[in-house]
Amino acid sequence: MSQKAVVNICVYGAEVICASCVNAPTSKDTFEWLKAALSRKYGQHCFDFIYVDINEQQSDREQTDMCKRILEEEFFYPLVTINGEIAGEGHIQLSHLHQKLQHLV
């Protein structure tokens, strides 16, 4: 049985809820929910979970660029990437993430 590579799940967000995401959970709550839900379904060893606060300075260039795009309102937050590709933004749908993860885990 071959072992698949670890999948990087990154959630970009802020402490303040996005103006268009009223009544939605906070970005940090979304991160914790995704971490629990995906680990329960696929196993913890499959993922490397990262939370990025868009209002803090980042040392990673890719994260810095994504934060800038979110702050310039190109995307809503929370924004989820899977292995660097955008998988969802705003109100995150678990079913959409499962579809994107099918061939990775």
Image (spheres, grey):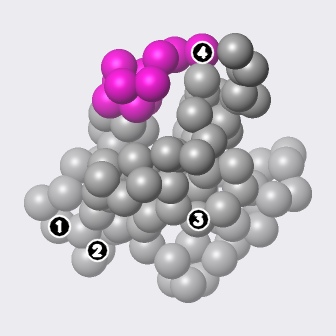
**SS for callout 1:** loop
Report the Cα–Cα distance between label 3 and label 2: 20 Å
Query: How many marks on residues?
Result: 4
Report the Cα–Cα distance between label 3 and label 4: 22 Å
Which numbered disc, 3 or 2, marks the residue that appears first in the sequence? 2
Q: Callout 1, which amino acid? A: Val
Q: Residue furthest left?
A: 23
Name the residue carrying label 2.
19
Report the Cα–Cα distance between label 1 and label 2: 6 Å
**SS for callout 3:** strand
Which numbered disc, 2 or 4, marks the residue that appears first in the sequence? 2
Q: Which residues are magenta?
A: 35-45
Q: Callout 4, which amino acid? A: His
Labels 1 & 2 near each other (Cβ < 8 A): yes
Quadrant occupied by the N terminus: top right
**SS for callout 2:** loop
Label 1 or label 4, whichever lies nearer to me, is: 4
